[in-house]
Amino acid sequence: MKREGLLYIVSAPSGAGKTSLCKEVVDILPNLRHSVSHTTRTARPGEIHGVDYFFVSPGEFLRMVDAGEFAEWAHVHGNMYGTAIKTLEEFRHDGVDVILDIDCQGALKLKERFGCGVYIFILPPDLQELRRRLNQRNSETPETIERRLEAATDEIRESRWYDYIIVNVLFQQAADELKSVLLAEHCRTGRVLKAVSEIFDIQ
Ligand code: 5GP
């Protein structure tokens, strides 16, 4: 049965474990690809251009904005981040699923602009644990951590309009829940009914 490629949009406050969860499901599910965003932030140790992000200058980013090359973009924590239309188009053929790890502003823009996609919000167990995880990263300055924690409450408020909320208490359990959501979405009646009608010749 031919299946359409789905767009999964995953948001979370910084430190909730979203990036690791997205990587985990991309490793497990052969039909799933990760959309690589463009950003003006500098690469953290170990991050690779074209794999984690396309790291571009503010000038290049704004050129892409003016040229209408982004499906969505936003200012997040003092930097600009965006999903290039080209990146989505490269993936969304032949039934390939795409997972986007983007902030709430960008997610809302995608929802309003395209009206499609499955929206998933990852929560930390509580704010204390979020602080602990951000401190543990060792890649953030104290100012960055405070800025990200301040933003967290506003971001968590946005979870109400997402399709799913996953609380990341234990990583493996959260990964299993995310995987279940991604797989279950393909079984929605609305997505398979047309093919079923054709195969079984029912109206
Ligand atoms: P980080 O700098 O920690 O990698 O990401 C900071 C925030 O930017 C995260 O919430 C991440 O989801 C978001 N982000 C990453 N890529 C994009 C993007 O293409 N568009 C938007 N709107 N947000 C993004």
Image: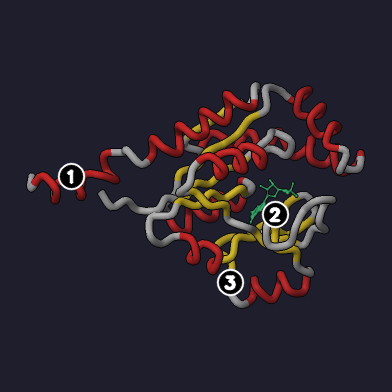
Residue 125, above or below 196: above
Q: Residue at x 63, y 30 (%)?
A: 123
Image point (49%, 48%), residue name: 32
Of pointers 2 and 1, the one earlier in the residue sequence = 2
Query: Which is more N-terminal, label 2 or label 3?
Result: 2
Residue 203 visible to an observer of this rendering: no
Q: Which residue is mark 3?
A: 69
Left or right: 20, with 194 as reference point:
right
Position of 112 compared to 124: left or right? left
**Is the residue 162 above or below the residue 57 in the image?**
above
Q: CA distance from mark 3 to mark 2?
A: 19 Å
Name the kind of residue labelled 1 in the image: Val
Image location of residue 41, percent across then percent down: 79, 58
Q: Residue 102 — which label?
A: none
Amino acid bearing label 3 = Glu
Q: Disc 2 residue type?
A: Asp
Please give left or right for residue 202 compared with residue 33 in the image: left
Q: CA distance from mark 2 to mark 1?
A: 39 Å
Q: Quick one: SS at disc 1? A: helix
**Mark 2 CB lies closer than 8 A to ligand 1:** yes
Residue placed under numbered mark 1 in the picture: 196
